[in-house]
Amino acid sequence: MSRIRVLPRSRVPAPARVRAAVVAALLLPLAACSSSGSPGTPDAEGKPKADDRPVTVTVTPAGERVPAGKPVKVTASGGRLTSVTVTDGEGHRLAGKVAADGRSWVSDRKAVPGAAYAVTAATRSEGGTAKSTRASFTTAPAAKVNKVDWRPGTGSTVGVAQPISLVFDNPVRNRAEVEKQLRISTSDDTEGSWGWIRDWSGRDRVDWRPREYWKPGTEVTLNATLNGTDSGPAGGWFVRDYATTFTVGARQIVKVDLDRHRLTLERDGETVRRIPVSGGTPGGDKRSWRGTAVLMAKEGTINMNSETVGLGDAYDKMVDYSMRLTWSGMYAHAAPWNARWFGNANRSSGCIGMSDANAAWFYGQVRPGDPFEITGEDTKGVVDPGNGFGAWNLSWSEWGEKSALR
């Protein structure tokens, strides 16, 4: 009878034992990592591990007397930025925001010329260690400064045709960059556009006008955050910001019909008064301008000298109730010496003249920004955009083409 040999249950073939040993060996280091925490995290006492590397912070620009005109940028390597503070020598802060990934921060404004900046960056490493890093830099002063003359003045109430106008001391070649810093806000979301023109003085100028006349009661704010902006070759740097606020008054329109020798004041669509006038003499340089001129200023009693407007020695006299319409010298004013021509013929040296009584009344009714819509057969042309506030003589599409951002 044959015999069968049975192996004990406790014994395992040699190949199986080898496989089990390998698996056990592989599991040992995994268990060890899991029990002591991931690299760089604090231990039980809150102290960082030896491999918790510090965050590297980089600030640009860096150094002394560096060029101005660029935003301040702070970056972090090996960790995250939790906050950044940048202040100038006068304690003014440059606003900015940490990026979503925590790796960078960029200022909203540019570094300005001739300033000292202090930077404090708070960081947290990959291992959780918090740290603060400080840096500083200075910017080179401006070799040349550009300044701005602007209208209308803060707190004023203006007519419905008043533009916002900025005239620059020096040329502006970086027009798009400058225009980006000019922000208009209105109480009723008025549509409008900037346009670059040549001022009558020969200087660069940029105006903002609505698509149509302002609505009465509109509140307007200009914030020109130009400090730290380079106006380009031969122009220099802007070293300050500019701001103005104003309100639009009643809808007053002055209609001047030179062919009928009559001026009509309309308010809110209703005729207030018609006044007989005498405009510029036909057939030569003494003719009046036509188109839309905007009342620039009420100058009261002034000396008018024909030599200042290229008309030789035709006149030199004191004139009452003077209301300026163009830089080239066209006014509405009292002209009692021309009384026989009021309502009958144009016999002035280019201005719109009326009686003392009518001029006194009219002077008290109008305000800067009121449009004078002038028509007539024999004039010397349409008011140029830079000759006073003549932007209304361009179509909306023509005006839009004058923006540097189109």
Image: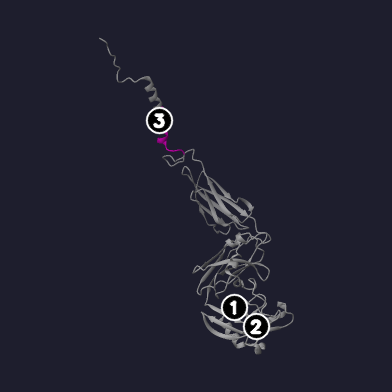
Asked if labels 1 and 2 touch by Cβ distance under 8 angstroms, the answer is: no
Q: Amino acid at mark 2?
A: Gly
- Of 101 and 355, nearer the camera is 355
Q: Of the residues under marks 2 and 1, which one precedes in the sequence?
A: 2
Nearest to viewer (mark 3 / mark 1): 1
- Of 381 and 12, nearer the camera is 381
SS for callout 2: loop
Q: Which class describes the residues within 10 Å of circle 1: few (<14), some (14-19), or many (20+)?
A: some
Asked if labels 2 and 3 touch by Cβ distance under 8 angstroms, the answer is: no
User: Is 32 within the magenta?
Assistant: yes
Residue 406, above or below 82: below
Q: CA distance from mark 2 to mark 1?
A: 13 Å
Q: Amino acid at mark 3?
A: Leu
Q: What is the magenta range?
A: 25-39
Q: Of the residues under marks 3 and 2, which one precedes in the sequence?
A: 3
Instruction: Tell me the number on the disc at residue 27.
Output: 3
Instruction: Tell me the number on the disc at residue 184.
Output: none
In the image, farthest residue toward the bottom: 340
Q: Quadrant of residue 238?
A: bottom right
Q: Of the residues under marks 3 and 1, which one precedes in the sequence?
A: 3
In the image, farthest residue toward the top: 1
- Of 324 and 268, nearer the camera is 268
The colour scheme used here is one colour
Q: Which residue is mark 1?
A: 373
Q: Quadrant of the N terminus?
A: top left
Q: CA distance from mark 3 to mark 1?
A: 93 Å
Q: Which residue is mark 2?
A: 279
